[in-house]
Image: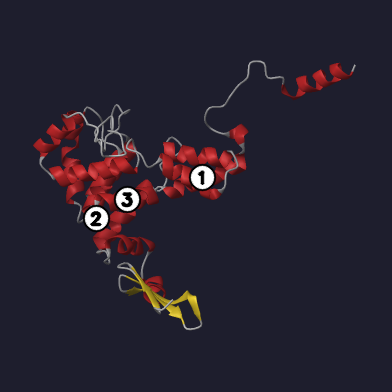
Amino acid sequence: MNEESIHTRIWQEEAEPDNAFAAASCHCHGYDVYGDLLVHASWIEYLFLLFRGEAPTPGQARLLEGLAVALANPGPRDAAVHAAMCGGVGGSTSASCLIAALAVGAGASGGAREVLLAMEDWLERGTDLALWQTGLAAKPVDDPADVWPAPGHPAGFDPYGVRCTGPVLQTLAYLAALDGAPSLAWLQDHRAALESAAGLPLAMSGVAAAALRDLGCTPAQGEMLFLLLRLPGAAVHALEQQDYGHKNFPFFRVELENDPGPAQKVANVAEAGA
């Protein structure tokens, strides 16, 4: 290595004088990570800095923290968490469980891609209710240049829902009341009209998209943050299933009509030896 430092727009390192493979100092967007951020910044503030390249305002930090709490554990009914649980109960490695959650939670039906699509809708429609109503009524069309198939429902809405769920309503109400959340406040005020146009209730992905827009994230940044913020729940549920074992798995328990069971197996062995 001819250079004594490694740097990107995000990160700058200077090597230890006696070890070119170890950093002596690290700066994130100009902030000394171990000399300043470690002492003074919260995890949420540091996360915002990493993605946005600047320190958050107090309002932005509260908004991101609220969103992080709401997304941290989608629960066992969520497909991504369920995938991690399947990995855990099957004895997969920790990395495999998280990769399963990321893979299943990446799609356009409740996953991170849906958040990206909803954020793109925000860019196109802003807070123009008429544009939203027209867009929500239109049928999605496949883009031959895109690896993703056209979603079967409007992004940010629940394709299986009958009415907006309690957690979605509570999350939207809390986040919309925070300072610096104009998209969330508009979504709160116009939720009923949007749901009527979509023919579906608002989903957590729709709330997340509005929050990430208010945080100044690009759709690509929002997609990545959504994936990241949902991993804690997947992790702990996978660990729990490793301890419980397959007989206590909460889904799809199989009951065999002709299961010999331990007692019958012993009888069969005795008969075979007689």
**Circle 2 crowding by C-alpha within 10 Å: few under 14, some 14–19, many from 20:** many
Mark linked to residue 67: 3
Q: Which residue is mark 2?
A: 215
Q: Secondary structure at mark 1?
A: helix
Q: Which residue is mark 1?
A: 97
Decide which of 86, 179 is in the foreground and name it: 86
In space, the residues marked 1 and 2 are separated at their CA atoms by: 30 Å
Q: Residue at x 27, y 34 (%)?
A: 157
Tag 2 and tag 3, C-beta contact below 8 Å: yes
In space, the residues marked 1 and 3 are separated at their CA atoms by: 23 Å
Amino acid at dot 2: Leu
Q: Nearer the viewer, mark 1 or mark 2?
A: 1
Q: Secondary structure at mark 3?
A: helix
Disc nearer the start of the sequence (1/3):
3
Q: Tell me where residue 113 appears, x and y as whole percent.
A: 31, 42
Disc nearer the start of the sequence (2/3):
3
Q: Residue at x 25, y 41 (%)?
A: 117
Q: Tell me the quarter of the picture where residue 52 sits.
A: bottom left
Tag 1 and tag 2, C-beta contact below 8 Å: no
Q: Tell me where residue 230 appears, x and y as whole percent.
A: 40, 47
Q: Is residue 12 above or below residue 183?
A: below
In space, the residues marked 2 and 3 are separated at their CA atoms by: 10 Å
Q: Tell me the quarter of the picture where residue 30 sits.
A: bottom left
Disc nearer the start of the sequence (1/2):
1
Q: Residue at x 31, y 60 (%)?
A: 51
Q: Secondary structure at mark 2?
A: loop
Q: Is residue 36 above or below residue 226?
A: below
Q: Tell me where residue 130 appears, x and y as whole percent.
A: 9, 36
